[in-house]
Image (cartoon, rainbow, N blue to C red):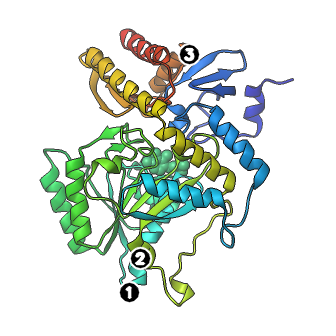
Amino acid sequence: MQSLKERDKKHLWHPLTQHKIHPEALPIIKAKGALLYDENENTYIDGIASWYTAMYGHCNDYILEKVQHQMQQLDQIVFASFTHEPAIKLSEELIKILPDNQEKIFFSDNGSTANEVGIKMALQYHFNRGEKRNTIVAFENGFHGDTFGAMSASGLSVYNGPFEDFFINVKRIPTPNSENIDSVIKELQECITTHQVAAFIYEPLVQGANTMHMFEAKYLNQILDICKDNTIITIADEVMTGFGKTGKTFASDYIETKPDIISMSKALTAGFVPMAITSCTQQIYDAFLDDSVGKAFFHAHTYSANPIACSVALAAIELLQSEEIQNNIHRITRSHKDFDAKIKNHPKIKRTRQTGVIYALDLDIEMDRYGKKRYEIFDHFMKNGVALRPLGSTVYILPPYVITQEQLQKVYDTIVELLENL
Ligand SMILES: *Cc1c(COP(=O)(O)O)cnc(C)c1O
């Protein structure tokens, strides 16, 4: 019998992988809590919760129980003609925890489609009101996904080369900080006078794929206010930041001016199954109501509001609100702070940053995002039983909320060891 590694190579094409030069993928046969298990019974602490999805721990028993029940009850139904309680209940529970102005819930399959839906909603909002607006504003170096609309809005363009000629119209502004805020606002205002701006899409407070770049709520608030004044639909991409990671339920909770549209995925379904949601205000929804069918939102996915996925999301929201998980979020946040105080002046570190359970440090070395050095650092972590995926020279931790203090300490120790050996 060939090994899993050998069989993998025969037919599989992995994402974000140059198969000619990149090392083989590691087979994982089991996962529980914060741990991943390989074929040889080695364990790895999942320091990034499998791209910030499995926040309540892998194969969480509570979610398993709920999902098993749902699987025996109702598996799938066409959401274009039918409805079901898991979706209804999920809409009720989500609206309770979303920013106050959110009223309507629209389902899709992943973070990219959630943003695709948000962008389409914004464009059609203006269209339905008889206005032609054709430009989206986004932050430089943002990431919103890999489908066309989401990819166009994404500013991390190094790998978008083949597609750039086909992008939708997007204008970019820098993320704000104390030094550039005035010029960012000027750029935005210029853009508004020279273009028909339909929407502004942004990752609130933390740009995940952009090496966990962080910026302050008060500056974002200024930008959002200008958008509001100009009827520009604001779309908060909370695919990464949503569901507790920033210390509040949504990053938008730190910002006074609330978005018109919010996209969610990743931790929404706790690593069990793919699903995404785009929420919006009553005002957006109302612009689609008309006696003609033409003003309706004609966007659907076969698995929209899949009942099993909805039941997972419901269980995940229950867990998020539990005292245990809330305490864990505070524990991890404090623990990162302590670690940061010890480590931030290390000569091999350029800078560090933290928002909630998200912690990132930039190594003081030159390297490519997907270069050789990056793979060596990845190997160092894996050899020590810690699964962290450096983003170029940035090492970040975004652990499942259920990570034990001992496991978290091991993640820190492995980072310190890397620094000593750089
Ligand atoms: C992951 C991510 C996406 C894309 O989600 P997919 O499920 O991978 O399509 C979009 N926006 C942000 C902020 C993300 O972190």
Residue at point 44%, 31% (across, down): 398
The relative height of residue 288 versus residue 212 in the rendered view (above or below) is: below
Residue at point 29%, 27% (across, down): 352
Residue at point 68%, 55% (across, down): 307
Pick whichever, 6 or 154, lies toward us: 154
Marks 1/3 in contact by CB < 8 Å: the verdict is no
Pick whichever, 213 or 57, lies toward us: 57
Amino acid at circle 1: Gly
The relative height of residue 7 versus residue 79 in the rendered view (above or below) is: above
Amino acid at circle 3: Gly
Per the image, the residue denoted by label 1 is: 130
Q: In 3D space, how far apart are the residues under numbered discs 1 and 3 (Cα atoms)?
A: 57 Å
Q: Is residue 167 visible?
A: no
Q: Secondary structure at mark 1?
A: loop
Q: Which of disc 2 and disc 3 is earlier in sequence? A: 2
Q: Quadrant of the N terminus?
A: top right
Marks 1/2 in contact by CB < 8 Å: the verdict is no
Q: In 3D space, how far apart are the residues under numbered discs 1 and 2 (Cα atoms)?
A: 9 Å
Q: Quadrant of the C terminus?
A: top left
Pick whichever, 162 or 380, lies toward us: 380
Disc 1 crowd rating (10 Å Cα; few below 14, some 14-19, many 20+) is: few
Does label 2 point to a residue whose CB lies under 8 Å from ligand 1?
A: no
Q: Which mark is residue 385?
A: 3
Q: Position of residue 376 (x, y in %)?
A: 49, 20
Q: Secondary structure at mark 3?
A: loop
Disc 3 crowd rating (10 Å Cα; few below 14, some 14-19, many 20+) is: many
Q: Position of residue 401 (x, y in %)?
A: 48, 30
Q: Position of residue 285 (x, y in %)?
A: 45, 74
Q: Which mark is residue 125?
A: 2
The reply, left or right, for residue 170 in relation to residue 255 is right
Disc 2 crowd rating (10 Å Cα; few below 14, some 14-19, many 20+) is: many
Q: In 3D space, how far apart are the residues under numbered discs 3 and 2 (Cα atoms)?
A: 49 Å
